[in-house]
Structure formats: C-alpha cells, structure tokens
Image: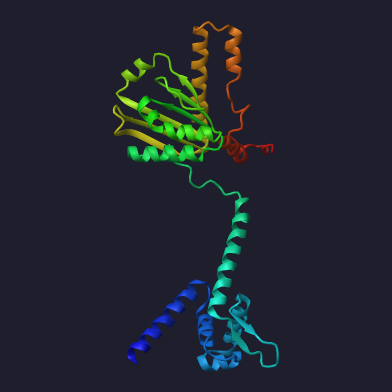
Amino acid sequence: MVVYKYTNTMRRTKAHDYLRELGLNQLEVEVYIFLLPQPPTTAYRIAKSLGKPAANVYKAVESLSRRGALIVEDGPNRLCRPVPARVFLKRAVTTFNEISMAAEVALANTEFAPIDEHVYRVETVEQIYVHCREMLEKAKAVAVIDAFPIPLERMRPWVEKAARRGVEIFVEAYEPIALGKARVTLIPVADSIVRQWNAQQLNLVIDGEESLMALLTKDGTGVLQAYWSNSLYLSCLHHGGRLCEQTLVRALEARRNGATPEEVMALLESHPFFMNKSIPGQKKLIRRYSTTKEQK
C-alpha cells in the first residue's frame, strides 16, 4: 500500500512537471490534474476542493479552455469537463508545430543586425579542413581558392562536388591538377615557389561571405597560423584580391605564349569584377551600408 501511494505520487509529480514545461502555470496544472479523474463539476467546486481563491480558478479554467485542455459546458452551472490527456497532448503538439512553422516563415524575412562578424584563430589541421568542407558545401555562387599541392589534394572531393552543384570555382594551383568543372589557373614557376616556402598555403573564400587563410607545416600535418572569418568586408576583399591575381597570371601567360594585345585585353575585360558578377557577400554589404537601396 505504501509502495502504491509512493509510485502514484511520483507519477503525479512527473505529470505536473511535464505540464508546466508545456506552458501551463501552477494553478492550471492543479486544476487539470484534479479534473481528470472527476465527473464534470463547476469552477466554484474546483476552487473549494483545491482550497484556492475562486477568482483565480475561474481564470485558470478560461485559460485551460482556450488551450483545449477542458470543455466548459453551456448552461447555468457551466460544468467543466477535462479533455482526455492523450487528446489534449496530441493537440498541443499540433499547435506547437503550427506555431513553429509560422514563426519560421515570419522570421525568415526579418533583417537582423550583424552581431558576430569576427576573425577567429583556427588551431588544428582537422579544424581547418572541417571549415573547408563546410564552406564548400554551403557555397551558393562562387568559391575562390589559392592552395599548395598538399591541401588542394585534400580538398579535391569537396571542390569537385561543389562545382557539380553549379558553384563557380576559381582555383590557383601550384602543380597541374584537374578538378572537374572548376577553373584552374596554374602559377608559372610553381615548383620554385613551393620549394622556397617551408610551409603549405591554403586560402579559400566563398560567396564573399566567409574566408579561410591557413599556413600549414611543410608536410601539411601542423598549423603555423590559420584564421577563419565571417566578416563580409574582409571576405569581399579576399575574394576580389584572389581573383585579380588569377586573372593577372592568365594574362601574363597568354602574352608570353604569343597572344595579341587585343586577346590579352579581352581576357582582362572578361575578369569577374563585382560590377559584372552577383556576389552574395557584396550584395549584403550594399544592403547594409550603401546610401542607396540595392536594386532588386
């Protein structure tokens, strides 16, 4: 008998806690749990049974009725009938999901002020490649890469996958490499450049929104220094600078290989400037800081 009473009390306590977490206040929980095993009764009798002020119980009954936890019958006595717990809780889940979906839609169009645009130090090689993979997976329009052979080979599957999704990818490489649909610019005298560095470089920027700059040890297993940033301004600068270097390299190589001045000029004029390309990060900067509204 003692065990039964203890178990029953524990169940009621847990039920009380769960209902509180659903948003019911203390008195609403007491009223609902009191009503569940009872026949329909009035709010006045509930107040007398619980020893609570009648006015407070009337308010609790109204609130529970709005929540779908009980039904108040028409008639002079206004008898209160509890909705079975299973039905009430199922309805609560449905309501929560509907409100959550509506809130998601409403908040999707809300402009939030920038609150977290910083530069972060990246401490390990594993963290560097996690950033690389996540950045290339989330890239929407364009990615620009400047990487020595070891990190570029490690990035190969993510680069090729992003390119297959339609992301425009520009790669500055230091040894011949094919990366699917990515556009690769091979640096002249790349061998001597790699040899003169006792390190491996890895630079990546996506959409003018996020950038990663890393200097690894010669064998690529350690970090000399590395930084990741979600600063729009820094990322747009990184994007523009890296692309300009690639276009300049292609123009110089074309001239050395006998291209006419007109052909070199055509190559330069095809350079993807901010003015002739839609870069998500730049659009956000314009929306945030320009004196005129961005054209839709």
Q: Nearer the viewer, residue 105 or 230?
A: 105
Residue at 37%, 84% in the rendered image: 7
Please identify the quarter of the rendering in which residue 38 is found: bottom right
Q: How is the image coloured?
A: rainbow
As drawn, the residue found furthest toward the right would be 75
Query: How far across and down, in percent of the image, does residue 253 sit?
Result: 49, 12
Q: Is residue 234 visible?
A: no
* Residue 219 can be seen, yes or no: yes
Pick whichever, 145 or 160, lies toward us.
160
The foreground one among 116 and 42 is 42
Q: Residue 108: where, in percent of width, then height?
A: 60, 51
| Image quadrant in which the C terminus is located | top right
Q: Is residue 269 above or below residue 228?
A: above
Q: Is 80 placed above or below 228 here? A: below
- The quadrant in which residue 142 appears is top right
Relative to 236, say whether 44 is above or below.
below
Q: Quadrant of residue 70?
A: bottom right
Q: Give the x, y percent position of residue 263.
A: 59, 10
How many callouts does the rendering have?
A: 0
Left or right? Give the position of 180 relative to 56.
Answer: left
Q: In the picture, which quadrant includes the N terminus?
A: bottom left
Q: Position of residue 248 (x, y in %)?
A: 51, 17
User: 256 left or right of 72?
Assistant: left
